[in-house]
Amino acid sequence: MRLAERNQAIAPFYVMDVVRAAAQQQKAWDAQGRSMIHLSVGEPDFTAPEPVIAAATRALRDGRTGYTLAPGLPALRERIAAHYAQAHGVSIDPARVFVTAGASGALTLASLLLFNPGDEVLMPDPSYPCNKNFVAAAGAQARMLPAPATQRFQLTAREVEDAWTPQTAGVLLASPSNPTGTSIAPDELRRIVDAVRARGGVSIVDEIYLGLSYDSAFGQTALAAGEDVITVNSFSKYFQMTGWRLGWLVVPPALVAPLERMAGNLFICASSVAQNAALACFEPDTLQEYERRRAEFQRRRDRIVPGLEALGLRVPVHPDGAFYVYADCSAYSADSWDFCFDVMRDTGVVLVPGKDFGTTEPQRYFRLSYANSMANLDEALARLRSYLERKAA
């Protein structure tokens, strides 16, 4: 069957190769009574708290399962806006909040709304691999700019200025970032936004891990940089509703009407059950539970980072958010792809090689997700220690 040419622009999602290989190995290990430790997929091991589940159950029982308006339930948009004021001190009009089918739906809509075929969009290398594919789906092209550890694996304003061409339509950033767990310093982010604005471009900032920030020097929303900044967020990570497929955009007032027209045609609306459930995310007791869980993620970070470094797996930039570590395995292997698959086969610890995230020294780095129990993280470190000692012998 003939495929549309745009398929050629969609790059592979290599983490799925890792997941498939791990699933095959899992069968063999289960038969032997051995356990695998999955530190690959970026999914919280916590699930939605009880108040969220109860709200979803009530919505089902009450028949609140029909279509909503394309921008989402007004009450949910109001609560999201209020959360920005409470958590970040930023006042936004709820009309600018647009509820979407996950952050993926948000990035798809933003790309289709803003980018034309032939446009280029500046992004850091390394980045979450799907972000460049949202841009490609709109017929535009992601231009990946090297973002080494000396830049916290993030772009700088000077780099954006130097890379800008007549074809550049804007930037797509992530703060905190997947795979590195690093954020852009607020002052640097403002300089990037200023540089993009001065050139007539658009700034989109993926903030799906913003709630999982652990350093007071970071953790501020990009909305503070101006009303023209577009931010993407999600109920998947901080709110731990991954499979509910619910996210949101905050857009400038001028984009509300065209976005509603496009979303209404392409998606109709996000899940009404998930929207009704998400209302409970902002209750005081639920937010208190989320903060308890955020502290647990921070505790895990503070265990796994020094644990890796003690094994000679250097972490060049300590993560300040999300639940990832981007670690350097070059002391033990010339290629992180080989390293990760060998570790998986030998120890049952599943990691993701840097190949999935870009072309800037991917062979040096692997990503570890610490969205797992402390007991499993300790066991993973013990298995890695034994493996590395055997390799060095």
Image (cartoon, grey):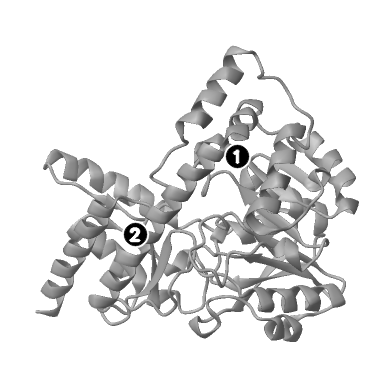
Does the rendering let one see residue 44? Answer: yes
The answer for how far apart the CA atoms under marks 1 and 2 are is 25 Å
Q: Judging from the image, what secondary structure is the residue with disc 2 in?
A: helix
Looking at the picture, does residue 20 appear above or below residue 360?
A: above
Q: Out of 145 and 221, give the one closest to the viewer.
A: 221
Q: Position of residue 354 (x, y in %)?
A: 43, 69
In the rendered image, which residue does mark 1 sit on?
Answer: 282
Q: Position of residue 41 (x, y in %)?
A: 41, 52
The image quadrant that residue 177 belongs to is bottom right
Question: In the current view of this chain or complex, which residue is farthest to the left?
Answer: 393
Does the rendering let one see residue 9? Answer: no
In the rendered image, which residue does mark 2 sit on?
Answer: 300
Dots 1, 2 in contact, CB < 8 A: no
* Residue at 73% across, 86% down: 162
Looking at the picture, does residue 260 appear above or below residue 41?
A: above
- Disc 2 residue crowd, few under 14, some 14–19, many 20+, Cα 10 Å: many
Looking at the picture, does residue 57 appear above or below residue 50?
A: above
